[in-house]
Amino acid sequence: MVLEGNDRETIAACQRGDRDAFRALFETYQDKVYSIALRYAGERAVALDIAQEVFLKLLHNIEHFRGESGFETWLYRLVVNQCLDHRRRGRRLMLLVENLFDSLPSAKESAIEELLRSEVQEQVQRGIGRLRPEMRIVVVLRYTEGLAYEQIAEILGCSKGTVASRLNRAHKLLERRLAHLRRT
Amino acid sequence: MNSIESILEQNLRPVAAPGELWTRINSPQKTTSSRFVWAMAAAVVVAGLAWSFGRPDTFRSSDPAAIRAWVISRTGMEIPLIGGEVQGARVKMGTVEVAYKGGGMLVAKAAGPGDRVHWVKGKGVVSWTMGGQLYTLEGDAEAGCRLCHAD
């Protein structure tokens, strides 16, 4: 990504410790960061942890950003590293609790309907969750962010061929695991 | 037949970040995973599932004493309601939800002994055990406290 004038100014302001500028960067990139984290981790609570840590690292490390790579690539690397480093901390049950409370104020029936509607998405997410981390992150960057092979290769620091190979293997594994969905 | 690419495109779309993310960045939370939290979480899940799948028995009243008596008659559980802006209660498979202006309180039999307090969620939800019962408060905590405390 080539930074526009305003983005450069925002980043420069962030580097000077301007909190409003950080807020502006957060507003711009929060959905992107959270989406990657959620699609990678498959759990809202874990995704929030990852996104929180990414923005805190961004806040503390932005002074080291020199513009040698695009800002978006630099940010993607922070997200990818955080995803790959993240250790699950037994949060699955806590997630259930949080989801339960999220649904409490509304009618229980609508929560169940919503659960059924999201069943397919959960199956896809479970299929992705079983992929090895380096394969999973390629799938997320490709399908959640719509990035080109070249961009993914730059973010991960590998060759375009490696990206293509990982994606190809992921497709084959997922084709088998999600075969029942392909017939619908 | 759908291609795997189209299935992935449809199900891995970007989503909006929740509003609480900014709050968390400004006051970072540490994740917790003590055995107590797990026990509490399990008890709340059981209570929540029981609540979700049973048929509710509802009682509407703004009188804490009346609700207290009604809950005892339905479940045998004593909830020390004395005030607050209570609106009613529901019982579903042995779990009680007391509705009040600003939130709700879920009460179920506790899974283990001992009186404890622990925050289940960073904001808005507190859960504790007292007298063999598990209480979970969601919403306006101050208003919730007034259900059972005079001050």
Image: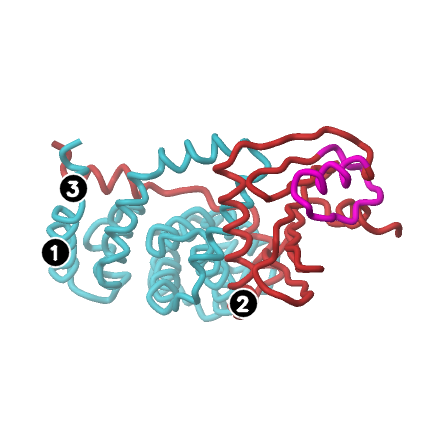
Chain B appears what colour? red
Parent chain of label 2: B
Co-location on one chain, circles 1 and 2: no
B136 or A146: nearer the eye? B136
Q: Give the cyan chain's letter.
A: A
Q: Quadrant of the N terminus of chain B?
A: top left
List the residue tagged with mark 2: B32
Q: Amino acid at mark 2?
A: Thr
The tag on residue B54 is none
Query: Where is residue B92 shown, x and y percent of the image?
Result: 57, 38
Co-location on one chain, circles 1 and 3: no
Parent chain of label 1: A
The tag on residue A169 is 1
Query: Where is residue B71 shown, x and y percent of the image?
Result: 71, 40
Q: Do the numbered discs 1 and 3 sit on residues whose CB atoms are within 8 Å?
A: no
Question: What crowding class fits label 1: few (fewer than 14 Cα within 10 Å), some (14-19), or many (20 or more)?
Answer: few
What's the magenta region?
B66-88
What is the distance, in whole Å, between disc 1 and disc 3 at their CAs?
Answer: 12 Å
Does the magenta portion include A122?
A: no
* Location of residue A105 with respect to B136 vertically, above or below: above
Q: Amino acid at mark 1?
A: Arg
Select label 1 or label 2 by which is in front: 2
**Residue located 34% across and 50% down the image:** A39
**Residue located 27% across and 37% down the image:** B10
B37 or A85: nearer the eye? B37
| The image quarter in which residue A66 lies | bottom left
What is the distance, in whole Å, between disc 1 and disc 2 at their CAs?
Answer: 36 Å
Q: Do the numbered discs 1 and 2 sit on residues whose CB atoms are within 8 Å?
A: no
Question: What crowding class fits label 2: few (fewer than 14 Cα within 10 Å), some (14-19), or many (20 or more)?
Answer: some
List the residue tagged with mark 3: B4
